[in-house]
Amino acid sequence: MAEGDTTVEKLKAQFPEAVLEEKEFRGETTVELRAKDLVEVCLLLRDDPGLKYEMLTHVTGADYSATGLPPRFAAVYELYSLEHRRRLRLKVPLTDNPPTVPSVTSIWPGANWHERETYDLMGIVFKGHPDLRRIMMPDDWQGHPLRKDYPSEDEPVAFSATADYPELESIGTQVMEAPSPESSLPPGVDTEKYMVLNMGPQHPATHGVLRVVLELDGETMVSAHPDIGHLHSGIEKTAESKTYQQVIPYTDRMDYVSGMNNNLPYILAVEKLLDVEIPPRAQYLRVLCCELQRLGAHLIWLGTSVLDLSGVIMSLLMYCFRDREAIYDLFEMICGARQTPSYFCIGGVRWDTPPGWVDAVRAFVNELPKHLADYDTMLTQNPIFKSRTVGIGVLSREDALAMGVTGPCLRGAGVDYDVRKYTPYSSYQDFEFDIPTQPEGDAYARYLVRMEEMRQSVRIIHQALDSLPDGPIQCEDRKITLPPREELDTSMEALIHQFKLVTEGFSPPVGEVYVGCENPKGELGFYVVSDGSPKPYRVKIRGPSFSNLQAAGIMAKGQLLSDMVSIIGSVDITLGEVDR
């Protein structure tokens, strides 16, 4: 039975007129619904014991005006059932002007930011949303950037001009007025009863441009409202004008401490569209690099978050950077890059391992457990560290699932969801490793989970090194991967394939897929829509930091002002991925 069959049968039986169409593509099920039935259908999907789609992965929208197919807009919902390990995509065609659909925040509160983002960038109105306003763009922004008729270009640049040209007289001067309007406040904030304080956008403990509006009763936080969008980089819009292969370097730069992990889900999504098989050696190399990257990301989190909490443990930051630099040395050996590698490519990996790389990785993972033991000694029973983390920023299991939280934040609330186990990819099913969980749901629990995750990553790397297969590192389809360089001097056919792939790219079949992977921060997913051209029609990025940060308001309520530093640090965000 194909995935989703049971779900669709129940939906048709319960709501015979609501289901407009059912589609299967690459093993994924998409159900088109009438907008007026959406809330009732979602309640059934969440509450029926045989369905139990308790997690809303993301909400987004699509503008089909460039295809010429009516209606122009559709709202898209990606659901997941942890109990049944089953995904489902709901799609709601929208014919109103403006396009309008009921909000599902009453069913999955984590839909709040996702619906606001879709409203902001696509112009879809979510009726009944508690706070429907822009989230990425400024309040006075005109238009919706992800619509197909919204230009991606800015004003023309006069490349031929010289410094003597009159047009350039204003360089180095303020050419526009720079008013400083009063910052807007979230609805419900009481400026008469409570003190309102802005933490950020520029604050050393926010690790990027994050503004948090804090409502304070003395030093106790009555409410906390993260305000994002200050770093909006427009990667999803940019992807629409690039070939599939050209999009890869942009994914590096979202979460700049997790480059390898960022590349993989996008590449897997494109490979799923293409329906290609990746050689075992390439899959194992991807696992090796992703687990090394996970170690590097957790080490940076450990050093920086502890520094935020207590200067007396500042030396830990230096130790963590030492280990992270060793990982970057390994990346540099295999691909020549350190922080933004783009080592993975559609069809495999770009190069095989150089001489000595496997031995260097083995030497590193043999040494790292000793360092992790030192960090454990420095922190786990440290009274200062525990006073700043135990009982701080508590997130219950129920709230974590309702908010769509994933990664260590979810496992720190007692839920063992890990994409590598629940939906194995890139040969993760070949490896034995445990999913660490802690029931308390506080900042200390999230610390314990990440520490154990590093030990499990070492365990996976040892297994991958011991059983690294021989063979090719790219699929053999010359319409997808570049031919070997040695063939270019002797084969005209190889030269033609090289030229066409570099200049034109390849064209996957029409369809849509979603692939999620276990990023160090949680589930990083890519929803990719193909219209049959060499460029993606729509790329939606489901960032773990984006969804996890939304839950910070729940964690902060009733805590002290100083605890906000611990809460933000324990969530482990990268603003480049939040504001992608």
Image: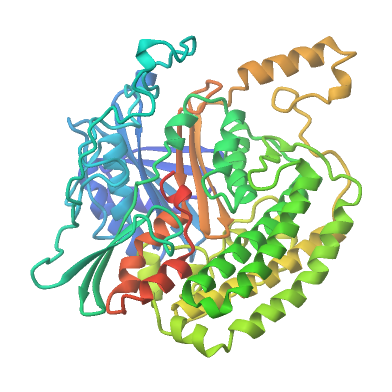
| Camera sees residue 416 | yes
Report whether 172 appears left or right of 16: right
Q: Nearer the viewer, residue 290 or 336?
A: 336
Q: Residue furthest front?
A: 164
Examine the image and state in which quarter residue 139 appears.
top left
> How many dots with numbers?
0
Q: Is residue 280 visible?
A: no
| Image quadrant assignment for residue 275 | top right
Choose between 58 and 200: the one closer to the eye.
Answer: 200
Q: Is residue 44 left or right of residue 378?
A: left
Q: Is residue 196 above or below residue 427?
A: below
Q: Position of residue 97 (x, y in %)?
A: 17, 30
**Nearer to the camera, 345 or 336:** 336
Q: Position of residue 210 (x, y in %)?
A: 37, 55
- State the image coordinates of residue 572 (x, y, percent, origin top left): 49, 63
| Residue 119: image location, x then y, percent | 26, 41
Quarter placement of the C terminus: top left
Q: Residue at x 77, y 62 (%)?
A: 461
Identify the image's colour scheme: rainbow, by chain, secondary structure or one colour: rainbow
| Residue for point 43% across, 65% down | 205
**Front-most of 557 and 492?**
557
Examine the rendered structure and indicate whether residue 477 appears above or below residue 48. Answer: above
Q: Report whether 11 appears left or right of 438.
A: left
Residue at 59% x, 85% y: name it: 380
Q: Please determine whether, in this image, residue 489 is positioned above or below residue 96.
A: above
Residue drawn at point x = 17 percent, y = 50 percent = 182
